[in-house]
Image (cartoon, helix red, strand yellow):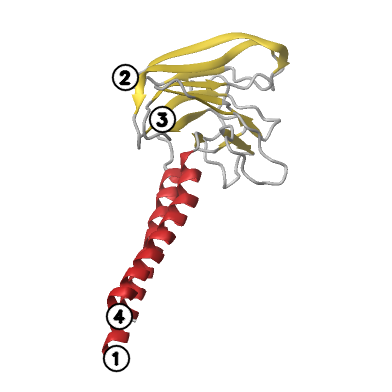
Amino acid sequence: MTMTTTVRRAAAVTAGALALTLGLAVPALAHVTVNPGTAVKGSWTKLAFRVPNERDNASTTKVEVEFPTDNPLPFVSVRPVPGWDVKVTQGKLPAPVVSDSGDTITESVLKITWTGGKIGPGQFEEFEASVGPLPTKVDELTFPTVQTYSNDEVVKWADPAKSDGSEPDHPAPALKLVAAGDDTAGGHGAASPSAAPSVAAVSGGDSSDGTARLIGAAGVVIGVVGTAVGVAGLRRRTQ
C-alpha cells in the first residue's frame, strides 16, 4: 500500500469521525435552554433564555417564552436587549393559586415576547428576566418557548421530559429547584420576599461545557489524523 493511498484512507476515516462527532455534539448545544439550569427554592434569580439559530437559510425573528401558571412567579422584570422589542403579557391564571406565603394569586406574568431583532445563522442570543421568589414546594419549572424564523417556520420547544430518561426532540427549557445549601444550585441564595430582585452575571458553565466537548472531540479527530500519518510514514521507511 502506498503512502498516498494510506493518507487518503486516513482522511476518509477522519472525515467520517468528524461528521459523526459533530452530528452527536451539535444538536445537544442547539436546544433553547434556560441558564443557569438550577436555582435555590425561595430565592430571587436571573434567568437567561438562550436561543440559538438552527437554520442556515433563515434568521430567528421572534421568541415567545411561556411562564408557569400552576406555580406562578410573583415578580418578573426584563432586561432590554439591543435591537429587540419586548412585551410582558400579564393576565388571569386558569385557576387561583395559593403562594408559599399564603397569598391567593389570581394574576401573573403569562408570557414574554421578544420581536423586532434578528438572530442570524450560526448565532445565538440570550433574553434575560429577573424573577422571584421561586416556589419552595416543587422541584422544577418549565418555560415552553416558541421560536419563529424569517421564513415563517415555527419551532415549539415544549416537549416534556421522557419517562425513560431520554431527551425529547424539542425539550421545554427547564429550571431545576433545589434546597438552600445544595452544592448543585446555580441560582442566587434565598432572599427576603421584600428584597428587590438583583441582576447578576449568569454563569457560563453550560456554554463552556459545550465548547469543551467540541474542543475535546476535535482533539480526538486530530489524534486520528496524526496516528494515521505516522503509521504511513513508518511503513514507507520499512518498505
The N terminus - image quarter: bottom left
Q: Which residue sits at x=51%, y=35%?
A: 33
Mark 4: which amino acid? Thr
**Quadrant in the picture for residue 92:** top right
Mark 1: which amino acid? Gln
Q: Nearer the viewer, mark 2 or mark 4?
A: 4
The alpha-carbon separation of the residues under discs 3 and 4 comes to 52 Å
Q: Which residue is mark 3?
A: 126
Q: Which residue sits at x=51%, y=18%?
A: 76
Q: Which mark is residue 187?
A: none
Structural crowding at the residue carrying mark 3, measured as other residues with C-alpha within 10 Å and reported as few (<14), some (14–19) or many (≥20): some
The alpha-carbon separation of the residues under discs 4 and 1 comes to 10 Å
Q: Which residue is mark 4?
A: 2
Tell which circle, 2 or 4, labels the residue nearer the N-terminal end: 4
Q: Which mark is residue 83?
A: 2
Tell which circle, 3 or 1, labels the residue nearer the N-terminal end: 3
Left or right? Give the position of 19 relative to 6: right
